Image: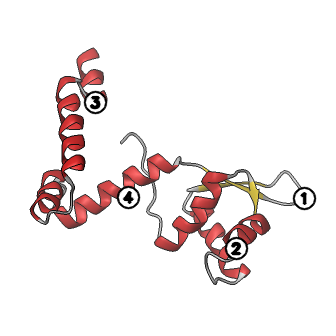
Amino acid sequence: MSKYVPSISEAEWEVMQILWKKNPITANEVILSLEGRVDWKPKTIRTMLDRLVQKRVVGVNKNQKVYTFYPLYSQNECQRAEAQSFIKRIYGGTLKSLLVQFMEEDSLSEAEIDELKSILDRGNKEPSTTNKKQASK
C-alpha cells in the first residue's frame, strides 16, 4: 500500500460509513444519520469526529459558519488497511492461512470457492501493480 492509513476503531467505522455516503457533512448531520443505528449521545459522536480529525482520517472545512467533515481516505483504502492489519495480527501476515482455515471449516460455498479460483487464476496471469512498477524501472 502506498500510503499509511491510520487504524479506525469499530465505533469510528460507524461514523466513517456516514461520511463515505455523503460528504462534506456537518456534525449535526452525522448525528442525525446515526440516530436509530446507535444509542450514542451527540457529544460522543462529536468526540469521535474530533478523534478521526486528529488521526488524519477525516478532514474538516473550517471556512464556513458550520464546520463540515469529509473522509481523507476512501472506503476501499480503509478496508484494505484493516484487512492487512487483521491478516498480519491473526495469521502472521499470510493470506493463505486465512483461506485454508475457511476452506477447512466449510465456511465457503462451492460457488464462492469457484469464484476465488477464478480470481486467483486472473491474478496469476496479470502482473500486480507492484510488479509492473518494478518492471518499468
Rendering coords of residue 52 (x, y %) = 58, 64
Give the mark toward the camera: 3 or 4. 4
Of the residues shown, which amino acid type is indicated by label 3?
Thr
Which residue matches tag 2?
A: 46
Which residue matches tag 4?
A: 82
Q: Which label's residue is closer to the chain start, 2 or 4?
A: 2
* Circle 4: element type: helix
Quarter holding residue 90: bottom left
Which residue matches tag 1?
A: 65
Q: Quadrant of the C terminus?
A: top left
* Circle 3: element type: helix
Residue drawn where x is 13% and y is 66% of the image: 105
Q: Residue furthest top?
A: 136
Cβ–Cβ under 8 Å for marks 2 and 4: no
Q: Which label's residue is closer to the chain start, 4 or 1?
A: 1
> Disc 1 versus disc 3: distance between alpha carbons?
44 Å
Dot label at residue 130: 3
Of the residues shown, which amino acid type is indicated by label 1?
Lys
Residue drawn where x is 17% and y is 39% of the image: 117
Residue drawn where x is 46% and y is 47% of the image: 76
Q: Which label's residue is closer to the chain start, 3 or 4?
A: 4
Number of other residues with Cα within 10 Å of mark 1, as a class: few under 14, some 14 to 19, many 20 or more = few
